[in-house]
Every structure is written in structure tokens, then in C-alpha cells.
Image (cartoon, grey):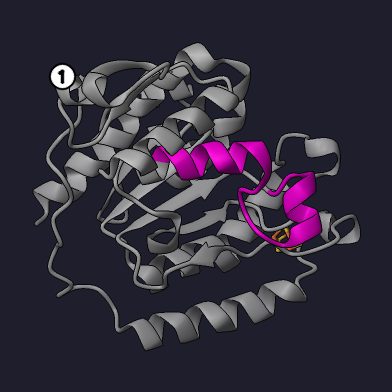
């Protein structure tokens, strides 16, 4: 990783209150040599990214077209009560040919205002953790289980999750056909795995969603409130890296 970029990442992590991280493709000795007044280096990450073959990935144009049709449908969706309180439908964004798809819970206030998933401080932290593990935001696809914001950011209800996943999320994932899924937060993990297990029991191993490997981690909004958990979350991002590299 470029040293100037690395320093910038680490300053941004520190600004967000995260004071311990792991580093991708760099030994502890190398990192310590680079850093001054930077967060503690915890471990070495797996080898740098390799390009996996794209044999099973749908053509980009086809995926983009399918996503576009779904997004147009979602824009006018009234299948659950959230359509009465939303400002904007936050469908998702990113590369239609992404190897990695990140699935979160639901739009928050800033997402509802901008129409983009994972913006604000939690979005910045997600971007940093992705990029530092070798996944620039532009190369992944990011979406939520729910496309409309629950009032006051309350928890999603089953009668909201069911129609939104059936009509939009499953279609998005089928169109993109990623090599790895990263579910961030309890609701995303439980919705994709059809499970009621606690996130602490789901993270740390590789699950399967319709033949696609799925890794679970904590939501970045939770990590901002509990920065001591960033170390654990970092291991999850490295697990995504490992799963992807093993497919190369
Ligand atoms: S949350 Fe999903 S199902 Fe509910 S109105 Fe929005 S797009 Fe439709």
C-alpha cells in the first residue's frame, strides 16, 4: 500500500475514534517504520488481492440492466408502510460486476436525504475498512436489506423485511452474482441467513447464501459506539479477503 495513502487512512481511522486496526499486505515491521503517531498495528493480513476469474459472473451489461429495472421498480414501491415516511428510496450503488457485495440494514437519516447507502461517519468507516483490506468502494457494491428508512432508525419489522428482500435484495444479489457477501449488522446477517442467531455467534466463520460465501461482521455504526470492537471487525474483513483470494 502506498505510504502516503496509508498515513491518510490511519489518520481518518483515528479521527473516527478507532485506535487499533490491522494492515493489508504489510508486515508489522514495515508498518511501524512508516507510521508516526498512528494506531497500533495488530496483525499482518493475508496476501494482497489477486484477480479471480470471472467465468461465472454475468455480463456487466446484463447485470447493470437487471439492476436498473429493479431500481426503477423500487423507486415507486409501496409494498410496505415505509413508503409513506421515506424521502428517497436508497436502492444501492457500486459496480454491477463486483466481487464483493456489502449488505447493511436500512438507510439512516443521511442516506434517506442523499439516496446513497452508507454515507456519513458510519459510511466513512466502512469505506476505510474496505479500502484498507484491498476493496476500494468503487469496486464493491453496497446496499441494504431495506430500501426505505424506518422512522427514527427503529429496527426493521418482519412485514418490511419480507417484501423488500423478496422483491429487491435477492434480485440484486442474483444480478451481480458476487464471489463473497459481507453482511454488516444483525439484521442483514439474519435476513440473508434466515437465522435468529446473535451476530456474535454468526461472525467469525464463512456461511453460505444461495451458494455464495457469506461473512458476517458488526455494523460500522456500532463500531463507532464501540471502537474496541474494531479489532474483531477487522478480522472479518480479512476473512472476506481470504475467501476471495482462495477462489483465485
Ligand atoms: S422498504 Fe422496500 S418494500 Fe418497503 S416500500 Fe421501501 S422498497 Fe418497498
Q: Is residue 156 above or below residue 116?
A: above
Measured as percent of width and height from the top left, residue 157 is found at 72, 41
Q: Quadrant of residue 44?
A: top left
Q: Which residue of the protein is positioned furthest toward the right in this rendering?
A: 84
Q: Main secondary structure of the magenta part?
A: helix
Measured as percent of width and height from the top left, residue 187 is found at 57, 37
Q: Is residue 130 above or below residue 226?
A: below
Seen at 75% across and 59% down, the residue is 114
Magenta span of residues: 107-129
Looking at the image, which is closer to me, 4 or 164? 4
Determine whether, in the image, residue 200 is placed left or right of residue 114.
Answer: left
Looking at the image, which is closer to me, 71 or 160? 71
- Tell me if residue 115 can be seen: yes
Is residue 124 one of those drawn in magenta? yes
- Tell me if residue 80 can be seen: no
Seen at 48% across and 11% down, the residue is 228
Please identify the quadrant where the N terminus is shown: top left
Q: Can you identify the residue that label 1 sits on? A: 29
Is residue 79 one of those drawn in magenta? no
Looking at the image, which is closer to me, 140 or 24? 24
Amino acid at each position: 500500500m502506498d505510504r502516503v495513502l496509508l498515513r491518510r487512512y490511519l489518520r481518518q481511522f483515528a479521527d473516527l475514534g478507532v485506535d487499533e486496526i490491522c494492515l493489508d499486505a504489510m508486515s508489522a515491521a514495515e508498518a511501524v517504520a512508516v507510521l508516526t503517531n498512528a494506531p497500533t498495528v495488530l496483525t499482518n493480513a493475508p496476501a494482497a488481492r489477486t484477480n479471480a476469474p470471472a467465468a461465472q459472473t454475468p455480463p456487466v451489461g446484463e447485470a447493470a440492466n437487471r439492476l436498473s429495472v429493479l431500481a426503477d421498480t423500487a423507486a415507486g414501491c409501496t409494498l410496505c408502510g415505509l413508503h409513506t415516511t421515506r424521502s428517497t428510496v436508497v436502492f444501492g450503488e457500486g459496480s454491477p460486476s463486483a466481487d464483493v457485495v456489502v449488505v447493511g440494514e436500512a438507510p439512516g437519516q443521511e442516506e434517506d436525504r442523499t439516496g446513497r447507502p452508507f454515507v456519513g461517519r458510519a459510511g466513512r468507516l466502512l469505506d476505510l475498512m474496505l479500502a484498507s483490506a484491498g476493496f476500494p468502494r468503487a469496486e464493491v457494491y453496497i446496499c441494504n436489506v431495506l430500501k426505505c428508512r424506518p422512522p427514527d432508525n427503529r429496527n426493521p419489522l418482519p412485514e418490511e423485511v419480507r417484501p423488500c428482500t423478496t422483491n429487491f435484495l435477492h434480485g440484486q444479489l442474483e444480478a451481480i452474482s458476487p464471489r463473497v457477501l459481507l453482511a454488516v449488522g444483525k439484521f442483514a446477517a439474519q435476513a440473508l441467513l434466515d437465522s435468529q442467531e446473535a451476530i456474535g455467534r454468526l461472525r467469525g466463520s464463512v456461511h453460505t447464501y444461495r451458494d455464495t460465501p457469506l461473512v458476517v461482521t458488526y455494523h460500522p455504526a456500532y463500531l463507532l459506539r464501540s471502537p474496541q470492537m474494531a479489532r474483531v471487525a477487522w478480522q472479518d474483513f480479512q476473512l472476506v479477503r481470504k475467501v476471495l483470494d482462495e477462489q483465485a
